Image: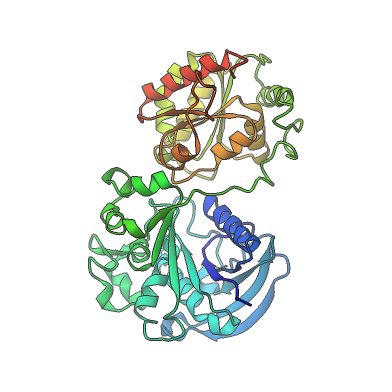
Amino acid sequence: MTRPLRILIVSTEVDPIASTGELGRSVGGLARALKGLGIDVRVVMPRYPRINTNLFDMVRLVKKVRIRTVNHFGEMTIWRDEIPGEVPVYLLEKEKYFDRDYIYGDPGQAYQDNAERFSFLSLAALEMFTQIGFYPNVIHCHDWHTGLIPAYLETVFRKDPLYTPLTTVFTVHDLIHQGRFSRDTLGVTGLPDSVYTPEGIEFYDGISFLKAGLMYADILTTESKRYSYEIQTQEYGRGFEGIFQKRSKDLYGVINGVDYKQHDPRIDPYIFVNYTKDDMERKQLCKEDLLETCEFEQCPDRPVVGMIASLDQEKGIDLLLEAFDDIMAMYVRFVFLQEGQSQNALYGNALRRLAEDHPIHFRCYLNYDEALKHKILAGADMLLIPSRSEPSGVLQLYALKYGTIPLVHATGGLDDTIVEFQPESGKGTGFKFTEYAPASLAAKLRDALIVYHNKPLW
């Protein structure tokens, strides 16, 4: 009998144990999906004593084991638990590095020793095989925090027969955060000086953990086909476009999947009434509930546009602000909900002022509310997603599930997953604007409203 493929996923975040957003959700969902395909998949992550939640039955596998390849990392403890779907998760405990209030740093900042923390994670994930008795065929590394794993395999472990059969996959979820540190930090990693070259991890007179993953992994993936092409351009590549061009044959764009167990109007506990695609008149009741929740006047025929986003320029907040007067002139109701914990005071203050200036038409909620998110998904007529760049995105997929029409900027995964609606044929799944400009956004919203007011077509 053939043994199943063995995959080890290494990530700083895994939902539902510890997650700050899409990385944890993506990794947790991927692990469960692979397990469902009959693959022997395991996950490795740090143990964050102050952060870890949803630990079900954690047991200590190894009380103390020393990191043998780089002496200054000392000892660690290995714990084991499972996430839903019976996926084993190994939690690496090192109080010095991970017993903190946040995963990466205080809000808006990064811990000064992040290079050392995530060098340890990468080495520990490789050295734990003999302790847990699991030898993977593939190591799947996620984002810059695990970028050193392929580099260690090509250098420190290169002559070790235990590691030579391994294949590595490196997935880029976020190009904004690149794991950049000074050249002096190379000594902390334990990597040889020979990697400090343009063909190695040197990056603008320093080092980049992200570049290490891009240069040394066998296969590169990102979260959509469109985005895999975009990052090969100067506009989106953030300094790595040359590497992506050079490695284009090894680069794959794979759109994120979504787990509809938590986003399904048939069973959603947060919304006013459950509904399916066959009884969409019940969605109207959810719209009335959203209007009441937001203290809008009850005008159910007037369109409601929702937006759920972090206060991040990449999410198109600047575009929203520039187009806002044009949007208000269309007599829509607009509900904005901040997702995440961004500390962008400039955007936050601007949105507050707009809410004060437009009390009849605009509501702004800057404290994230899970229930309100679901009410917007169910009660809005359209969901605006004007992201400047979006590797994948899942909100547009959730919106489709709720019968709420996405209006998106045609970039990355948004472009891959939304088909422009054609009134002549009646085919399509949403509305897309191509130029990242306020006039383009406003013009597409006008097009959408023309369809909205043609009820049979809508």
Residue that lies at the very extreme toward the front in this rendered image: 1
Along the line of sight, which residue is nearer the eye, 101 or 402?
402
Residue 334, given in percent of the width and then of the height, sits at 56, 23
Quadrant of the image occupied by residue 350: top left
Q: Is residue 363 visible?
A: no
Q: Image height check: is 293 above or below 247?
A: above
Residue 334 vertical position relative to residue 191 in the rendered view, above or below: above
Given residues 121 and 36, the one toward you in this image is 36
Q: Position of residue 298 (x, y in %)?
A: 69, 15
Residue at x-position 43% and y-position 17% = 326
Of the 4 image quadrants, the one containing the N terminus is bottom right
Please indicate whether residue 272 sits to the left or right of residue 28 in the image.
right
For the residue pair 250 and 262, the one nearer the viewer reads as 250
Indicate the quadrant containing the C terminus: top left, top right, bottom left or bottom right: top right
Residue 177, given in percent of the width and then of the height, sits at: 39, 54
Q: Is residue 318 in view from this perspective?
A: yes
For the image, the number of numbered tags is 0
Residue at x 25%, y 55% (from the top left corner): 242
| Residue at x 34%, y 48% (from the top left corner) | 231
- Compared with residue 237, is residue 218 higher up or lower down, i.e. above or below? below
In the image, taking residue 294 as reference, residue 181 lies left or right, namely: left
151 to the left or right of 85: left
Of 407 and 73, the residue lying toward us:
407
Please indicate whether residue 452 sits to the left or right of residue 69 in the image: right
In which image quadrant can residue 373 be found? top right
Q: Position of residue 36 (x, y in %)?
A: 65, 60
